[in-house]
Image (spheres, helix red, strand yellow):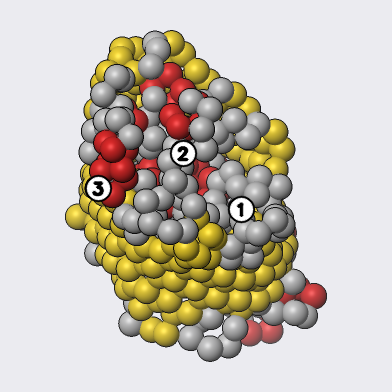
Amino acid sequence: MREMWRLRVMMGVVVLWAGVPTASAELPLPEAERAPDTREAMPPPEDFLELPRRDAPSPSQGVTAPASVEDQRAPRTPPEVERLHRSLSPEREIPRSLTGLHEHEAPETWEAQGVVTIDALNNAAGGVSTGLETVSLAEFVGVLRTDAWGWRGMEVAVHLAHALGDSPSRRVGDVSAVSGIDAGGANGFFVWDAWVQQALPWWGGRLRVGVVDFNNDFYVSDYANLFLNGSFGMGSELGGEGGVHTYPATGTGVQGFVEPGGGGYLNLGYWFGRPSVEGVLRNGGGGDFFAGELGWRRGVSGEAGYVKLGLGWWRDMERLTHWAGEDWRAAGRSGPAFSAAPKVGNSGGYLVGEVAVGRRLGLFFKAGRADPARNRYAASFAFGVHWSGVLPGHQEDALGLAVLQTRQSQEFLDYAAGEGVGYFRAESVYELTYSTRVGRYWFLQPDFQYVLQPGMDPNIGNALVVGLRLQALW
């Protein structure tokens, strides 16, 4: 009898090993003859293999981890790469991987990323002269978080860059900058950002001190960042007489952010002195710069239901005496003096909004205005469409169509007319672009821009710019 039970036990073990259930495997054994069950003591396979868990946090803060190891190692999508040029912003999906650690329960201690961007833009017709110009920008971004050492909520970030190449706008003659990485001749190495940020216990607050870029957190539209033209990033009215601290000339400042709830937010910033390519305080009578943005947002760009609306204002305390303008400086003059007496202070405001129509279609608009008595480029507006996943199987690709316009102030036009110089009132740009990923680390973005009335100069013909952006990310 005992031998029969042993035979049945052996048959049951063999059957269970083979994975085929039989009646012999289901016969109960006497309690005294049952083999001890050691399955509870076996550690799970994940403890042996250290497999990634799907519910584990992603290396990118605020982004759900992909379902496979291969996807987790994959580079970011083209719009995300584009946003690396302002990658230290806490309010957008990609920059959250570099800031805003209070939004994540288990942030990485440190992160680093690099990108090289090359814009080859050919002025095919019109403008000042036809021909090809190439500009490049190499960037490194590093973020260190102190949570693992007991100091919760602190981040130290550095954003280094090296610009190279001649400006494509010198052939086009435009004021909007057909390439957003055009450093305006400021080639070489510079510190773009270098700051310390501390999360605050109230209203999701953050306080940031150091070298900071205004356009990281102000006047920002996620969908507009797809386009090559620089004025889709920030209106030209802030790039003239306004002493704004942004690429490539940033400066030392203090920023504060609060999100009291319900989607509302308030950003405030104060910069000391005039902006500098070196990213440090420039002495010599420069005025300070102040900015704020009050707004509301819901969701994340690229997802259904996303909405953002922001109202911003700025003030520059520089003492202005002359209009700015490359055409005046090229003629050997500093620019015409104001008809009114010089005064301290220059100011303006802007409105930015965007909305997701489903998951694939996004719409955006921007509008800005500066004091027309002190700013040659006194107003700008832009609007456009961002469409992702246009082609089947290419969900990360993005197609964009947008238009922008920069307008001169009537005060400047009247003054210039009195000097015997005539200008058009506005310059307009129409841009069509398509961004696609090629392989693991490369991105291609063919681009077409038509510039109407470049530089508002009647002597410059409308320009057709055909180009290609190449990016490598690691």
Instruction: Give residue 90's position: percent from left, percent from top.
Output: 51, 64
Between 432 and 441, the residue placed more toward the observer is 432
Numbered disc in front, either 3 or 1: 3
Graded by Cα atoms within 10 Å as few (under 14), some (14 to 19) or many (20 or more), the crowding at tag 1 reads many
Residue plotted at (27% across, 41% down): 413
Between 108 and 89, the residue placed more toward the observer is 89
Q: CA distance from mark 3 to mark 1?
A: 28 Å
N-terminal of the pair, mark 3 or mark 1, is 1
Which numbered marker is on residue 450? none
The amino acid type of the residue labelled 3 equals Gln
Graded by Cα atoms within 10 Å as few (under 14), some (14 to 19) or many (20 or more), the crowding at tag 3 reads some
Residue plotted at (40% across, 76% down): 265
Mark 2, residue position: 335
Between 17 and 269, the residue placed more toward the observer is 269
Q: Residue furthest right?
A: 149
Taking 117 as reference, is 410 left or right?
A: left
Q: CA distance from mark 2 to mark 1?
A: 20 Å
Residue plotted at (69% across, 79% down): 152
N-terminal of the pair, mark 2 or mark 1, is 1
Locate the C terminus by quadrant.
top right
Taking 13 as reference, is 171 left or right?
A: left
Mark 1, residue position: 275
In the image, residue 59 above or below residue 403 = below
Taking 170 as reference, is 146 left or right?
A: right
User: Considering the numbered disc 2 on the image, is that residue within a helix, a strand or a loop?
Assistant: loop
Graded by Cα atoms within 10 Å as few (under 14), some (14 to 19) or many (20 or more), the crowding at tag 2 reads some
The amino acid type of the residue labelled 2 equals Gly
N-terminal of the pair, mark 2 or mark 3, is 2
The amino acid type of the residue labelled 1 equals Pro
Mark 3, residue position: 410
